[in-house]
Amino acid sequence: MQPFLPVPTADGSHTFYSKTFGEQFHSRDGAYDEARRTYAAATHLTTLATEQNAITLLDICYGLGYNTAAALEAIWAANPACQVTVIGLEFEPQVPKAAIAQHLTQAWPDSVQQVLQRLANTGQVQGRCQGQLLIGDARQQIQTLVSQGWQGDRIFLDPFSPPAAPNSGPWSFGVSGPVPQARGNFGHLLLCGGGAGGFAVSRVTPGDDPCRGP
Ligand SMILES: C[S@@+](CC[C@H](N)C(=O)[O-])C[C@H]1O[C@@H](n2cnc3c(N)ncnc32)[C@H](O)[C@@H]1O
């Protein structure tokens, strides 16, 4: 039996339900759509890709990889030559593997699917997208990245909601910044690099520029 069962969402894409957290991984309104709107579009990756030929992403709580997928789709639609570096952080390796095995990523562009497959099955990818999927507790992995001086263009943080996972706030992930403003709407929380402690935290609603902060 598959440990993770696909749940259909309104845009035709599928997500998983977590028995552990009692919550779906994505909105019922549309899993792909959520990744596209809430992460790729809200962080203006299309614009960034027209300005830069190299973009670095950190995808905390990688899950099925949809936020990375939406980012790659947006970047390469705007600038097919853009070199993308991505680090995904995920606690449960079976989640991305199950998404691939159950063909849940097959509606992303082929080039994006290849990246997701390599990350899920080998933990790394090379080529126009180079990167790693690091398995473990992101709270510790972030501290390692900070100590290594990691810097990037966009950081996505997509934990389960505070009621489902009370210890999943950005403060739990070792992220500094104006955290109180970020409470209460984690589905719309993104982070951008460059804060004094390594990360600046922004809550993003459609139309906001997350890099300007709250
Ligand atoms: C809401 S889902 C994220 C969905 C994902 N962004 C996607 O597009 O599929 C939350 C994910 O965070 C992972 N997670 C929860 N706590 C974590 C932690 N402390 N470190 C790393 N991953 C964690 C869960 O295993 C789950 O895959």
Image (spheres, rainbow, N blue to C red):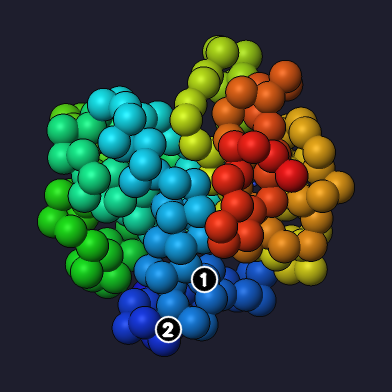
Answer with mark 1 or mark 2, whichever residue precedes in sequence: 2
Q: Horizontal placement of 20 versus 126: left or right?
A: right
Q: Position of residue 22 (x, y in %)?
A: 66, 76
Mark 2: give few (<14), some (14-19) or many (20+) Cα within 10 Å: some
> Which image quarter has ligand 1?
bottom right
Instruction: Report x, y in % for residue 170.
Output: 73, 43
The residue drawn where x is 49% and y is 47% is: 43
Task: Confirm whether residue 147 shows in the render.
Answer: yes
Quarter occupied by the N terminus: bottom left
Respond yes or no on whether mark 2 lies under 8 Å from ligand 1: no
| In the depicted structure, whether residue 191 falls above or below residue 149 | below
Q: Ligand 1 within 8 A of label 1's CB?
A: yes
Which residue is the site of mark 1? 26
Query: As drawn, which residue projects farthest toward the right?
Result: 180
Q: Nearer the viewer, residue 133 or 77?
A: 77
Give the residue type that dot 2 points to: Thr
Q: Amino acid at mark 1?
A: His
The quarter of the displayed image where residue 108 is located: bottom left
Question: At numbered mark 2, what does the secondary structure look like: helix, strand or loop?
Answer: loop
Q: Quadrant of residue 53?
A: top left
Q: Is residue 211 above or below residue 31?
A: above
Q: Are circles 1 and 2 on residues that touch, CB within 8 Å? A: yes
Secondary structure under tag 1 reads loop
The residue depicted at 33 percent of the width and 65 percent of the height is: 99
Q: Residue at x 81, y 43 (%)?
A: 179
- Residue 9's mark? 2
Separation (CA) of disc 1 from disc 2: 8 Å
Q: Nearer the viewer, residue 51 or 8?
A: 51
